[in-house]
Image: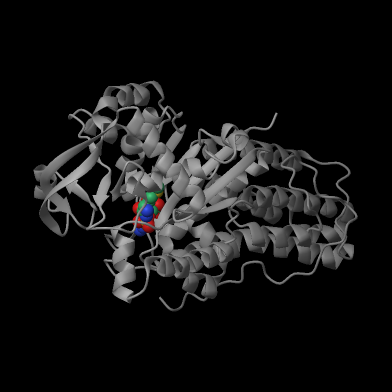
Amino acid sequence: MNNRFYITTPIYYVNDIPHIGHAYTTILADVLSRYQQQLGNNTFFLTGLDEHGQKVQDAASKRGIEPKDHCDEMSKHFTDLWERLHISNNDFIRTTEKRHKRVVKKILKVVYEAGDIYEDEYEGLYSVSEERFITDKEADTGQFRDIKKLKEKNYFFKMSKYQNALIEHINSNPSFIQPEHRKNEILGFLRQPLNDLCISRPKSRLNWGIELPFDSGYVTYVWFDALINYITAPGYLDDKISFGNYWPANLHLIGKDILTAHTVYWPTILMSAGIELPKTIFAHGWWLMGDAKMSKSSGNVVNPMDLIDDYGVDPVRYYLMREMVLGQDANFTLKSFINRYNSDLANDFGNLLSRISTLIKKNFDGYIPEASSSGDKEKKIISQSQELIKKFDDNMSKMSINDAIEETLQFVRNINRYFEHMAPWKLVKEDLKSAGIVLYTGAEALRICAVLLSPIMPQRIKTLLSVLNTDSVDRNWGGLKSGTKLGEHKPLFPRINSDIF
Ligand code: MSP
């Protein structure tokens, strides 16, 4: 039976155009979603935009336009980029949509009626950049900008009531927060008494938000609004069957910067509303430029469009997936991108296809030769290909995508070595049939690697498979048909001139 797999990205703020950090999480979700689909699972992949709150209101007012107009304009930048990056999301949610506002109001009502929301006058330090009240201790860390003293009547969510239940849930569900060190970080945080969460903003200060159903003088806090997108999209209010099918989400992918909101605010809100918790929240690290996080305020953002224009979409996807060890930070440099591209894609992978197709065209009129029988060397390649699939799946289930890719490339290097050893370019002169077996073995092994890499580089792999004249995405040996004619092709990954360094 097929399983369902519901995967989400954070919904991005529309205060600026997307950069490689946003592109990264979305590509990662796309790769995992395509991979799950390849395994035969029924996937639902959600991404979208977080359009309310102070940051967006400020960005719009700086431009002298209405927040909604600003959002509509920004949203196009994101959807255009997702299209160019071949993102295969099933839904795209914007928090200003009616379907979402209804759900937020409903959850606020349910939580209010459960007695988990109370009113209080609060005086404390407020961080404008974080859009929340902060403790004195937090203010002392120096990590918060634009702090001011504020006294206000507000509504609070009784998060503290769920502290023990949350700790219990984290302890009894080891895969709830991933990777392990992030789980420990949150358990450490939960050793201190948990404060209640201020979930309202007076309209006098911020009106770009969803109005509280029980007090029209307030809008709800942007995080209370945003997190709920994950249940709006699969149909919490609109489609009970779909919701029952997809919720709880299998995987919320996030960056480490939004860990607390996802692993403390979100589960306690769900507990109060009586909704099941997501299965896994996985926090990846940051892409750094030098030692600094890539972000708008640091002014060191890499525009993904420029990279794609220069080098193509799939090489960029490949680099991002190969270079980051999930859970840790990674450094982005153009030099390492070009090195990775030239060594893995141009030399090892692309070259293997060129070798095979040149020899088949020259000696077999372009028809894939027979693989009637095989010797020990071929049997070894066949068994290595099946071991690779096991290792690949094992790595993917541990979210070690970089290792899954590296294992595949190692096998590609093995195939190249097998060719050098068997030298089919010489063998054709002595024993055409044996040379044909070597070429078939190399081509079929390459097809399997291509199938494994197709969630990462969907377009180029499609081209490769069409050159091999097959649409077989079967991961078992034997998908390639002898006697079919190879297609014409240009080099799949032309070498990039690296003299610029
Ligand atoms: N709107 C909130 C999320 C709400 S989710 C219910 C938000 N948006 S954001 O636009 O700031 O995007 C945050 C996410 O973008 C990060 O968690 C991460 O997934 C991604 N990244 C942004 N910059 C990044 C890097 N430099 N490196 C890697 N990912 C980064 O927070």
Location of residue 92 in the rendering, given as x and y in whole percent from the top left corner? 54, 54
Residue shown at 27% from the left, 66% from the top? 297
Residue 343 in percent (x, y) is at 53, 62
Residue drawn at x 84%, y 54% as measured from the top left: 436
Which of the 4 image quarters holds residue 84? bottom right
The residue at the point 40 percent across, 26 percent down is: 174
Q: Nearer the viewer, residue 330 or 23?
A: 23
Q: Which quarter of the figure has residue 392?
A: top right
Q: Quadrant of residue 104?
A: top left
In the rendered image, the vertical position of residue 12 relative to residue 380, given as above or below: below
Q: Is residue 98 left or right of residue 83?
A: left
In this rendered view, identify the residue nearer to me: 387 or 374: 387
Q: Quadrant of the C terminus?
A: bottom left
Out of 392 and 79, give the one closest to the viewer.
79
Residue 328 in view (yes/no): no
Image side of residue 100 versus residue 135, left or right: right
Quadrant location of the N terminus in the rendered image:
top right
Q: Is residue 254 visible?
A: yes
Q: Horizontal and vertical percent for residue 276?
A: 46, 28
- The percent coordinates of residue 148 (x first, y second) are 11, 56
